[in-house]
Image (cartoon, grey):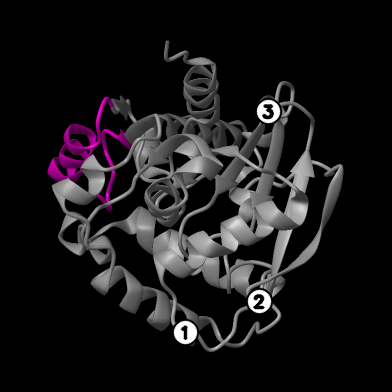
Amino acid sequence: MRAVLLSLFLGLIASSVAAQTVPRWMTLPPTPSLPTPDKSGLAPVNGISIWYASFGSGPPVILLHGGLANSNYWGNQVPVLAKSHRVIVMDSRGHGRSTRDSKPYGYTLMASDVIGLMDYLGVPQAAIVGWSDGAIIGLSLAMSHPDRVSRLFAFAANSDPSGVKDVTKSPVFTAFIARAEKEYQALSATPTEYKKFVDEISTMWMTQPHWTAADLGAIKVHTWIVDADHDEAIERPNTEFMAKSIPDAGLLLQPEVSHFSMLQAPEQFSDDILRFLARRWD
């Protein structure tokens, strides 16, 4: 009996040590839950319904999630930011609880959805924090609606399809795509259409955006270009190109994390956002 217990004990220790040796950029922590919002619902925007939730009070900041994901991925950041800001999250069209129409996915269209939600909520201007597709939408907003964006924190964006790696080679990204399917089935008004959804989003990824140095150089919004030092989806040279091309942009590389930094190191991610929101440009 003692031998059996000893064997089990040693097995638990070995498992624990093995788990500790996995670097955090190779993990995909559970998707968090959002806290109870002050207000939430479906907003009629551009002929579809955009799901949103609002938390706290103060200067508004809008969090835009990545492709295939949903607003729940911001569950670790919302409580921290809502202590000093009005935090608004939204599910992008066709994602999460939001609906879509027959229009093909595109960053310009999705940026117009953000403006439509801001109009619906009576928000004249907001800071934008975007992750991946959400960061690209933020850059589109900074170009087309600079008066509506007070500042932009763009994490894991790309300016051109050539700036994206082959994510099928990443076990973490592969696990995310599988998780996203289950979340889509649980949240979407069209739960059986995940494959069609992925195919159409993938078409957007392969063809958009196409921004030149001149396009980025026209951005006047205060911007930080942010990425992870182990991002499995974004090519580092493209990140550096964007930071160099946008006038006075900051470049921040978050350490020991990947494309899913907000899950892997939530305190670090939230602290970086707060530091950015408190930044003064005189």
Label 1 secondary element? helix
Are circles 2 and 3 on residues that touch, CB within 8 Å? no
Q: Which residue is mark 3?
A: 59
In the rendered view, would you say 224 is above or below 130?
Answer: above
State how far apart marks 2 and 1 are (Cα). Answer: 16 Å
Mark-to-mark CA distance, 3 and 1 = 38 Å
Q: Identify whether 221 is placed above or below 63.
A: above
Q: Residue at x 67, y 26 (%)?
A: 80
Q: Nearer the viewer, residue 262 or 211?
A: 211
What residue is rendered at 79% in x and 29% in y?
Answer: 57
Identify the residue shown where x is 68% and y is 28%.
59
Query: Dot 3 lies on which element?
Result: loop
Q: Are marks 2 and 1 in contact (CB under 8 Å)?
A: no
Q: Which residues are magenta?
A: 227-248
Image quadrant where residue 1 sits: top right
Between disc 3 and disc 1, whose residue precedes?
A: 3
Give the percent coordinates (x, y) of residue 141. 45, 51
- Report the residue marked by disc 2: 99
Label 2 Cα crowd, 10 Å radius (few <14 / some 14-19 / many 20+): some
Q: Looking at the image, is mark 2 or mark 1 nearer the viewer?
A: 2
Task: Name the residue carrying label 1.
Answer: 195
For the residue pair 120 and 75, the one nearer the viewer reads as 120
As drawn, 105 above or below 195: above
Q: CA distance from mark 2 to mark 3?
A: 28 Å
Of 149 and 241, nearer the camera is: 149
Q: Amino acid at mark 1?
A: Lys
Residue 10 appears left or right of 36: left
Q: Single out the residue that lies furthest toward the front.
A: 147
**Residue 33 picture location, percent across and down:** 71, 47
